[in-house]
Image: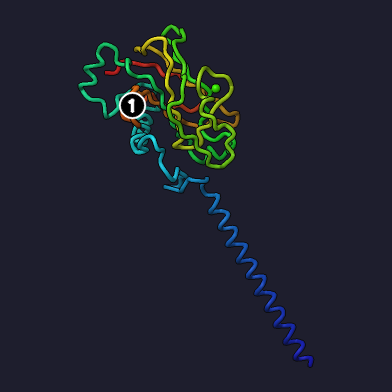
């Protein structure tokens, strides 16, 4: 009987160890799943060690935007206006009087790296408060008046600034948080006169106290622009207010 009792106790211990092992394995698997699910925000996927939108923005080719981003970055993120690849000689000729006559839209595309957006999940990405235009003497000649199109990303389902209209007009402390890369607003300008060389486009982004890595890329676009066709790169900006001065188009 004693041997039988020892045998039963030994089996019980073995079963207990198996149960513990199973619990440990389940915990490891669950932990692995948690780690994996936290790898990228909702609707974002890992690509080359970065989280990018699973679907590119509907309104423009992400590839074209990335190329222009690279070009601007090689210039040190300069704010000089450069020609886009779709501009033809015919349009150049037509622009000799005033190259900016038909440019009445500003496109602002978020370029925040996902890791940076995670630092402020309630306000992810660039926080655009307003947009105004002044002549070279500083006199206000217009503001961003209407949202033509937008895509506000909410990767962490915690964004509290989803109203793209908050990015219109002069700055008032109300901003739209574009989310992460791919979020954008296309703004129609209200202008007292057509834009000219020397005009200054000011984009107001609310800088965050914890150190701002929220980047965005700005384009100026014709009234008949489709996607990035008909747009020119204004440049990259990251923190606070940034002025983009319109220069000669050639
Ligand atoms: Ca605002």
Q: Residue at x 42, y 14 (%)?
A: 200
Q: Residues within 10 Å of mark 1 (few under 14, many from 20)?
A: some
Extreme-bottom residue of the structure: 1
Q: Quadrant of the C terminus?
A: top left
Determine the image quadrant of residue 247: top left
Residue 170 visible at all: yes
Quadrant containing the N terminus is: bottom right
Q: How is the image coloured?
A: rainbow
Q: Where's ligand 1: which quadrant?
A: top right
* Nearest the eye: 152 or 237: 152
| Observer-nearest of 6 and 174 | 174
- In the rendered image, residue 245, in percent from the top left (x then y), is placed at 39, 16
Q: Secondary structure at mark 1?
A: strand
Judged left or right of residue 17, residue 55 is left
How far from the left and from the top, in percent, is residue 104? Answer: 38, 19
**Residue drawn at x 24%, y 13% as measured from the top left:** 96
The residue nearer to you, when weighing 108 against 168, is 168
Question: 190 above or below 51?
Answer: above
Q: Is residue 42 above or below residue 20?
A: above
Instruction: Residue at 54% x, 35% y: name it.
Output: 124
Looking at the image, is 115 positioned above or below residue 213?
A: below
Residue 204 appears left or right of 122: left
Q: Position of residue 40 (x, y in %)?
A: 51, 47
Pinpoint residue 109: horizontal percent, then vertical percent. 43, 31
Residue 1 position (above or below residue 142):
below
| Residue identified by numbered label 1 | 225
**Residue placed at 37% from the left, 38% from the top?**
62
Q: Is residue 241 visible?
A: no
Q: Residue furthest right?
A: 2
């Amino acid at each position: 009987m004693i041997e039988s009792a020892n045998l039963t106790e030994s089996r019980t211990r073995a079963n207990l160890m198996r149960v513990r092992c199973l619990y440990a394995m389940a915990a490891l698997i669950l932990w692995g799943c948690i780690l994996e699910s936290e790898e990228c925000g909702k609707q974002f996927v890992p690509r080359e060690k970065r989280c990018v939108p699973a679907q590119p923005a509907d309104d423009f080719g992400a590839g074209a935007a990335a190329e222009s981003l690279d070009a601007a970055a090689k210039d040190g993120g300069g704010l000089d206006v450069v020609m886009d690849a779709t501009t033809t000689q015919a349009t150049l000729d037509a622009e000799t009087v005033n190259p900016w006559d038909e440019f009445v839209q500003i496109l602002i595309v978020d370029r925040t790296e996902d890791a940076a957006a995670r630092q402020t999940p309630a306000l992810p990405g660039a926080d655009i408060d307003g947009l105004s235009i002044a002549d070279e003497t500083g006199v206000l000649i217009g503001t961003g008046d209407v949202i033509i199109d937008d895509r506000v990303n909410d990767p962490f389902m915690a964004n509290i600034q989803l109203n793209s209209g908050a990015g219109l007009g002069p700055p008032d402390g109300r901003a739209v948080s574009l989310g992460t890369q791919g979020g954008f607003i296309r703004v129609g300008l209200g202008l007292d006169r057509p834009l000219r060389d020397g005009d200054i486009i000011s984009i107001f982004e609310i800088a965050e106290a914890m150190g701002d890595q929220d980047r965005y890329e700005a384009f100026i676009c014709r009234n008949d622009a489709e996607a990035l066709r008909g747009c020119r790169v204004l440049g990259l900006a990251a923190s606070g207010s940034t002025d983009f001065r319109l220069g000669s188009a050639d």
